[in-house]
Amino acid sequence: MIFRPLLVFVLAGLMLGGCAANPVTGKQNFVMMSEAQEMALGQQASEQIAQQMSMLKDPKLQAYVQRIGAQLANKSHRSGIPYQFNVVDSPDINAFALPGGHIYINRGLLIYLNSEAQMAAVLGHEIGHVTARHGVRQQSIAMGTGLIGQLITIGTGMPAAGDLSNMLGTAMVRGYGRDMELEADGLGAEYLARTGYRPEAVLDVIGALKNQDTYSSQKAAAQGKQVESYHGLFSTHPTHDQRLQQVVAQAQGLTTGDAQRVGRDDYLQMLDGMIYGDSPEQGIIRGQRFLHTELNMVLDYPKGWVILNRPDVLLAHTPDEQGFIALTMENLSNTNVTAEELLRARVGKQRLTQDQAFSGTGYKGFMATIPGDNARRVAAIVRGKQAFLFIGAFRGRGPLELYDEQFVQTIRSFRPLTAADKKNAQPMRIRLVRARQGDTYAKLAKGSPLGDEAEARLRLLNAQWPEGQPKAGQWLKVVR
């Protein structure tokens, strides 16, 4: 009991010492880093992002996004920050901001937008996170509650009290989420108005992304799966949300003049030729086959398996998500190492059984199993300076034999590309067409590489889902 007054005093000092004026509202917020530290944190995080994510190799589009983003940032509450806007070469529908003005938007999100104003709405939203220091505030809350938990544990001698504090801190962080997202949307709408765009573009974006979420959720539900939504208020609030309508209406009062920028045709022209879905640099998925032109490799997966292509790993799992096989690739410094030597070095002191060598065109391989309660199938393939490492595992009850035949089948399917493979590995691309009288999405979907999803996807791409139809003379996005 004698520690409580001291504890309260220390906590009060911590909270007061960690307050700073919000650049947007002027109110005191709990933060535990200076602006210089915020810049350093953002720079460090951006360097990690550069190692983990590929940026789109399209200088013209990158310059376009940077130009529009800079115009918005110049009208923001923190115009002195050196903002950097980047297009990530990912088909995922997402955008995010790091502290210090590093902002990223995926090409997978860009293709579902239909005007420069809508793109500006997304960029403005992310700028709002930076100007209000949301990332810094979130981290400060997490750091602060962690310190508070430690002090409570020391002061009371009860570890459970510290655990409770951490739980409360987590709840605080999550609780701030919706309010911060709403604040970012309001700031984004304000920056749109100040730059001459329609603030209502925020609502247009939310509507488009909600349609995408709804369609993906319906499709996933039909397959007995769940789908992750785009982060933030764009997915958690409907366009008719009263608070959202209010912040957009407030921003509308900041507009000057009657003309408000939309930029539909200019924006669509920038998308013409953009890759839809997987890119050759990341590998292409065609049915149950994975093809990678730069790595000159093909893998075939069992029927019904789901293939997930990530920057750091190629992962596939059984339909019931009980069996998994992962592939990673690395460049070898020692080209004299054998596949067996490499695999044994990677598994360390773990015992290997059922070991066997195998080979194919231009490569040598070695595979084995690691026995035990969590038995695994492992393999290494060496081809020149390239090494491909496989691990197959299961969760729940085994035995490994339930999945091992399919693991081995997948590993042995490894081979270089043929001429037919190279043709099949060409990516799908967004193309613009001018709608003619009598055109329908059903007609445009015929022969589309999108298959059974073509009609719905074309409607989503052109903001006319679920039942809209083209208007004669309108530019439309199709996939070819």
Image (cartoon, rainbow, N blue to C red):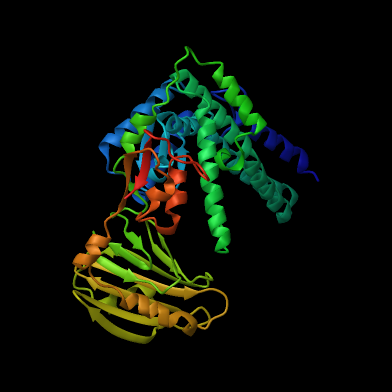
Q: Which percent across, then down, holds residue 238?
A: 61, 38
Front-most of residues 439 and 231 = 439
Q: Which percent across, then down, holds residue 448?
A: 36, 54
Give the vertical position of 346 relative to 246 (above or below).
below
Give the vertical position of 248 relative to 464 (above or below).
above
Q: Is residue 85 visible?
A: yes
Which residue reaches farthest bottom?
A: 354
**Which quarter of the picture shows residue 15?**
top right
Q: Which percent across, then down, holds residue 53?
A: 36, 49
> Exactly how many numbered labels are in the figure?
0
Which residue reaches farthest top?
A: 257
Give the vertical position of 73 relative to 388 (above or below).
above
Give the vertical position of 329 relative to 142 (above or below).
below
Q: Is residue 275 left or right of residue 456?
A: left
**Which quarter of the picture shows residue 336?**
bottom left
Q: Is residue 401 left or right of residue 284?
A: right
Q: Which percent across, then down, holds residue 112?
A: 43, 42
Q: Is residue 267 left or right of residue 224?
A: left
Q: Which residue is drawn at the image coordinates 22% and 66% (left, top)?
A: 420
Q: Is residue 50 visible?
A: no
Q: Which residue is drawn at the image coordinates 53% and 50% (left, top)?
A: 215
Q: Which residue is drawn at the image coordinates 40% and 73% (left, top)?
A: 391
Which residue reaches farthest right?
A: 1
Front-most of residues 293 and 113 = 113
